[in-house]
Amino acid sequence: MPRALSMQRSIVPAGERAKYFERLKARQGYYASAGCKFWVFEEAALSGAFIEFTESGEPATLAAAHAASPGLVLDPARIYIEVELS
């Protein structure tokens, strides 16, 4: 089964950065316990512009993790499936 990935973008004002990072740490722990990987990147040229990636080995695991997530997932049905390039 191909891997599954979802993405979520956020713009975080400087004054909310510490709280956002607390939520990210909690989200990372949650997704790890749900069998998913979680990464966050900040745009190099725009401080406060973040993109979060959540990945799983199968789409059903990722969908279930999003459905039970304690945090807001903006578009939980938007899951990308890895394409084999052969």
Image (spheres, grey):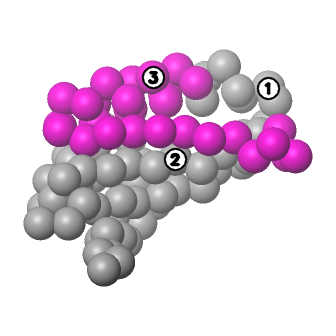
Residue 3: % across, % down: 25, 60
Residue 22: % across, % down: 52, 20
Residue 34 within the magenta-colored segment of the rendering: yes
Element at label 3: helix
Residue 59 seen in the figure: no
Residue type beneath disc 2: Glu
Residue 45: % across, % down: 87, 46
Q: Estimate how packed mark 2 is, as few (under 14), some (14 to 19) or many (20 or more) residues with alpha carbons within 10 Å.
A: some
Q: Quadrant of the N terminus?
A: bottom left
In this view, 71 is above or below 63: above
Pointer 2 or 1: first along the chain: 1
**Residue in view at x 38 percent, y 30 percent:** 28
State the residue lying farthest toward the bottom.
Answer: 86
Residue 25 within the magenta-colored segment of the rendering: yes
State the residue lying farthest toward the front.
Answer: 86
Residue type beneath disc 1: Gly
Pointer 3 or 2: first along the chain: 3
Magenta span: 21-47
Would residue 21 appear left or right of 58 to someone viewing this image?
Answer: right
Element at label 1: helix
Residue 16: % across, % down: 71, 28
Residue on which disc 1 sits:
15
In 3D space, how far apart are the residues under numbered discs 3 and 2 (Cα atoms)? 12 Å
Pointer 3 or 1: first along the chain: 1
Residue on which disc 3 sits:
25
**Residue in view at x 66 percent, y 19 percent:** 18
Residue type beneath disc 3: Lys
